[in-house]
Image: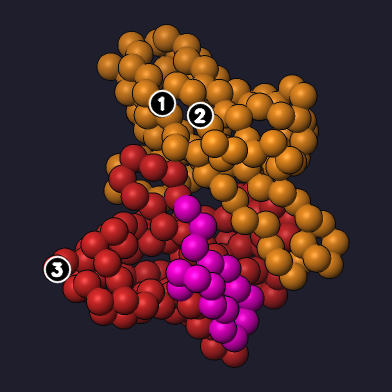
Chain colours: A red, B orange
Amino acid sequence: LAKTTQPISMDSYEGQEVNITCSHNNIATNDYITWYQQFPSQGPRFIIQGYKTKVTNEVASLFIPADRKSSTLSLPRVSLSDTAVYYCLVGDMRTGGGNKLTFGTGTQLKVEL
Amino acid sequence: DTGVSQNPRHKITKRGQNVTFRCDPISEHNRLYWYRQTLGQGPEFLTYFQNEAQLEKSRLLSDRFSAERPKGSFSTLEIQRTEQGDSAMYLCASSLDRGGIAGAQRGNEQFFGPGTRLTVL
């Protein structure tokens, strides 16, 4: 299993860019990097997924260096509604993951005015 | 709403009782997963189905837990002789296995339901 390490918590202000870095030193060749967001009393929600270099969608960007041993989720111009727990996952998504998908404790992002 | 649904949303039971939860995945999704989440922790994988076949089970899934997906659509998770340690949020997720090269390039996003909160007294 590719274990992930993320900061336990981060604080930011509205309008700021937030970067959350995840370490995954033993990532395997077939592993993808996926980020989920979770609000209290809700299931996690997919944010973005990537394999290498940079991926961007309408809500976030994901930066993955060449060695793939870490990744950075970038949230541009956060708002109060971005306050949530963010999970970095590493796993072989091609095969459905199974128990290769492991959620850590995540990063609690708190956005203030 | 065409997302993943779970019922009930909350369940309170006494220790020793049996409980059953239901998950209805997104209709065209062939994979279905069950996770358990306790306070302050991320979800922990329990088991997953490809259509009606249960392909993988975590060691967390003790003999008191059983999951089924009889027709490859909805799934049930049953806990027999509940214990206080079973109190948690039980999450269901589904995904579409695209397979082949396309699947490898795009990955298989999992869509989660709202969960069932179980409290064992």
| Residue at the front extreme of this rendering | B1
Marks 2 and 1 on same chain: yes
The residue type indicated by label 3 comes to Leu
In what element is the residue under mark 3?
loop
Q: Residue at x 42, y 9 (%)?
A: B17
Q: Please report, as a chain letter, where disc 1 is located.
A: B
Q: Residue at x 71, y 42 (%)?
A: B29
The residue type indicated by label 1 comes to Arg
Q: Nearer the viewer, mark 3 or mark 1?
A: 3
Q: Residue at x 49, y 23 (%)?
A: B7
- Distance, label 3 to label 2, CA atoms, is 35 Å
Q: Is residue B71 above or below residue A68?
A: above
Q: Is residue A61 above or below residue B49?
A: below
Residue A113: numbered disc: 3
Q: Residue B90 in the image: state x and y as whole percent.
A: 46, 33
Q: Residue at x 60, y 23 (%)?
A: B76
| Image quarter of the N terminus of chain A | bottom right
Within 10 Å of disc 1 (Cα), the crowding (few <14, some 14-19, many 20+) is: some
Marks 3 and 1 on same chain: no
Q: Which residue is mark 2?
A: B6
Residue B9: numbered disc: 1
